[in-house]
Amino acid sequence: MAGQMVSMADYLSSKHFDLVINLPMKSSGARRVSSFIPTYGYRTRRMAVDYSVPLITDVKCAKLIVESLLKTKGNLDCKSYVDTISSRKIIRLPGLIDTHVHLREPGAVHKEDFASGTAAALAGGVTLVCAMPNTNPAITDESSFLLAQGLASEKAHCDFALMVGAARDNFDTIKELAGKAAGLKMYLNDTYTTLKMDSVTDWAKHFANWPKSAPLCVHAEGRTTAAIILLANLHDRPVHICHVARREEIEIIKAAKLKGIPVTCEVAPHHLFL
């Protein structure tokens, strides 16, 4: 068997195989042997990955490709560098809206800009993005808003909307942009750039001045979540909690909604698996 493994390694390293189908064995209720012993099947799969040889380990996928080979008489027309649709049913969805993106323009285009970010959005089926204001300079007044709007209009590949940022000293002027912006974003915990606000007094000024008809979104974590929901209730206005990542925050929001407080929230997909 050892000699066979050496031969297999030679074949894989020299790319004599275009595809490896290796299905791990399962026993009812027991752990897979390869989870604690490096079996020959595991080694074959590992070598296929190491030598960049396409690998199938799922029996359903194996059946699909065998069926496709039979139907096309071996002339499969697919590209290995993109996902291939294997379902017999295609569902057409409308363009998605991503309400929370960081496009890093202006100020940090080495990370992302309106061109690259919106191109990636379109590739994922997103046709409208809402860009956050914690850029450099931050979008906290009309001049910075027009700067970001001009860059987006020039570079964006899909529809866009811009959030404006709350700061300690713009509570009485930022409201003038309520009709042009997607909403007001308040940063109450650590964030990129200078928009973090620690004073509840400053929070309250924005709650009092920002129009109730316009979205008010907050970056709030832990106890700050409870504090901002209380403030929203006192001002009798809706509030949206961004990128909730902790169970305790969801429980607070759920309790508030059961009390009739108009609070909504969002969660990033990767936070669901923390």
Image (cartoon, helix red, strand yellow):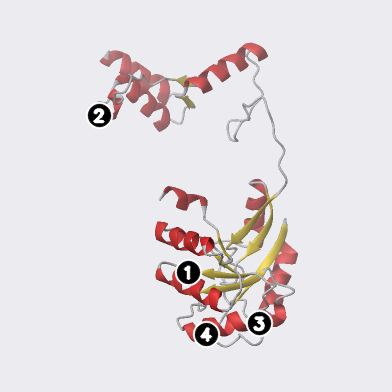
Q: Position of residue 249 (x, y in %)?
A: 44, 62
Which is nearer the N-term, disc 3 or disc 4?
3
| 225 w.r.t. 22: above or below | below
Q: Can residue 129 be spotted in the picture?
A: yes
Q: Position of residue 272 (x, y in %)?
A: 46, 49
Residue on which the image places disc 4: 202
Disc 2/disc 4 C-alpha distance (Å):
57 Å
Secondary structure, mark 1, is loop
Which is nearer the N-term, disc 3 or disc 2?
2
> What's the residue type where badge 1 is placed?
Ala
Q: Residues within 10 Å of mark 3 (few under 14, many from 20)?
A: many
| 86 w.r.t. 216: above or below | above
Callouts 4 and 1 close, C-beta under 8 Å: no
Which is nearer the N-term, disc 2 or disc 4?
2
Residue on which the image places disc 1: 220
Dividing the picture into quadrants, the one containing residue 106 is: bottom right
Q: Identify which residue is drawn at 36% across, 29% down.
A: 46
Residue on which the image places disc 2: 36
Q: Residues within 10 Å of mark 2 (few under 14, many from 20)?
A: few
> In the rendered view, does 124 fall on the left or right side of 146?
left
In this rendering, the label closer to the viewer, 3 or 2: 3
In this rendering, the label closer to the viewer, 2 or 4: 4
Which is nearer the N-term, disc 1 or disc 3?
3
Q: Identify which residue is drawn at 68% across, 78% down.
A: 211
